[in-house]
Image (cartoon, rainbow, N blue to C red):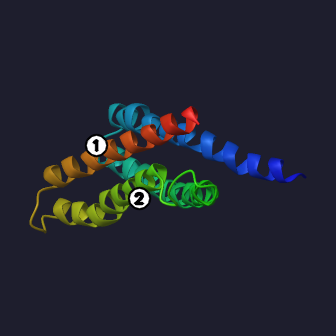
């Protein structure tokens, strides 16, 4: 395998993954979650949706790491060639996605469970609103990554 083809595989992945990831985020938010609540009773739908969003958070963490490594390689090559900084806009977008994922799922979910049990300072509705907003911001950041990746 030539050096050019070794660079081509990570570059193709770097361009492909954000679009697929954005599709997954949209499918969960616009198809899967609403379908659950239209087909199942509210408690069952909530449990399944919580599991779905937990899986999505794990996927998002894994893709942040993978794309972060791929982008770090690309930004490092560009910086060595004098064509930019080792800290690219894509890396900053990925950090934003990581922040939204960690705060939106790993910090807020335990608080939402406590609120559901009548504990905690905030209501379930308020926490759900914050979580939904973070998911929307994450989706916009991933859409921006996909758009930038498609541009080159």
- Between label 2 and label 1, give the one nearer the viewer: 2
Position of 42 relative to 75 (above/below): above
User: Considering only order in the chain, which callout, 1 or 2, is on the residue closer to the N terminus?
Assistant: 1
Marker disc for residue 95: 2
Residue 144, image x, y percentages: 43, 39
The residue at the point 38 percent across, 47 percent down is 49
Residue 152, image x, y percentages: 59, 37
Which class describes the residues within 10 Å of circle 1: few (<14), some (14-19), or many (20+)?
few
Q: Which residue is mark 1?
A: 42
Which class describes the residues within 10 Å of circle 2: few (<14), some (14-19), or many (20+)?
some
- Report the front residue among 41 and 69: 69
Position of 140 relative to 124 (above/below): above
Residue 96, image x, y percentages: 37, 55
In the figure, residue 26 lies in which quadrant?
A: top left
Element class at badge 1: helix
Marker disc for residue 51: none
Residue 108, image x, y percentages: 26, 61
Q: Residue most toward the right? A: 1
The residue at the point 29 percent across, 66 percent down is 107
Q: Residue most toward the front? A: 82
In-image side of 77 versus 48 (left or right): right
Q: Are marks 2 and 1 in contact (CB under 8 Å)?
A: no
In-image side of 42 versus 53 (left or right): left
Q: How many marks?
A: 2
């Amino acid at each position: 395998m030539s050096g050019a083809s070794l660079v081509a595989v990570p570059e193709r992945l770097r361009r492909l993954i954000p679009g697929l990831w954005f599709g997954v985020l949209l499918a969960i938010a616009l198809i899967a979650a609403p379908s659950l609540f239209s087909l199942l009773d509210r408690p069952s739908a909530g449990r399944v949706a919580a599991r779905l969003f937990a899986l999505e958070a794990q996927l998002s963490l894994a893709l942040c790491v993978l794309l972060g490594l791929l982008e770090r390689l690309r930004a490092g090559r560009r910086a060595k060639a004098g064509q930019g900084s080792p800290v690219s806009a894509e890396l900053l977008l990925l950090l934003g996605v990581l922040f939204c994922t960690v705060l939106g799922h790993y910090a807020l979910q335990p608080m939402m469970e406590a609120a559901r049990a009548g504990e905690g300072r905030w209501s379930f509705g308020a926490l759900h609103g914050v979580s939904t907003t973070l998911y929307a911001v994450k989706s916009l950041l991933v859409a921006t990554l996909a758009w930038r990746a498609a541009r080159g």
